[in-house]
Image (cartoon, rainbow, N blue to C red):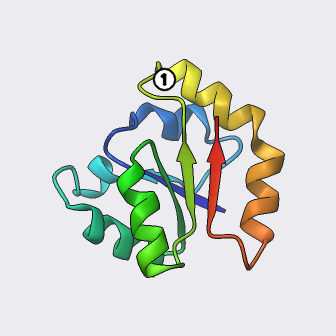
Amino acid sequence: MKLLFDHNLSHKLIHRLADLFPESAQTRLLGMATADDVTIWKYAGEHGYILVSLDSDFYDLSLVRGQPPKLIWLRCGNSTVAAVEMLVRNNRSRIEAFAADADAGCLEIF
């Protein structure tokens, strides 16, 4: 499973979570640091990513456009890289179940 972290989440998460999600990427590293939400949404869907964001705009987009991509909406506000890493690690089983559920479009993690 591949995660795409949006530009509001650190590119450092890619390396810190590589043992769990080795094919992941971050928008800035893909040349999309200033891309709008729709562009990021389309890219994630076309390239088989699950989008990970702190941004409620992506949730709204998921309601309008549906999946793909699936969305993991981190509801922790602005947090340290270490805190976001632990949030993802601690929810690994939920993320895996979400990825496997064909009907699920958004996973909120608090």
- Give the residue drawn at x 75%, y 40%: 91
- Amino acid type at image mark 1: Val
Q: Position of residue 30 (x, y in %)?
A: 30, 57
Quadrant including the C terminus? top right
- Give the residue drawn at x 46%, y 21%: 79
Q: Position of residue 86 (x, y in %)?
A: 66, 26
Q: Position of residue 71 (x, y in %)?
A: 55, 61
38 on left or right of 68: left
Residue 61 figure quarter: bottom left
Q: Quick one: SS at disc 1?
A: helix
Q: Is residue 89 depicted above or below 100 in this figure?
A: above
- Give the residue drawn at x 37%, y 69%: 41
Circle 1 residue: 81
- Local packing at callout 1 (Cα closer than 10 Å; few below 14, some 14-19, many 20+) is some
Q: Position of residue 73 (x, y in %)?
A: 54, 49
- Give the residue drawn at x 53%, y 29%: 76
Q: Is residue 13 depicted above or below 6 in this figure?
A: above
27 on left or right of 72: left
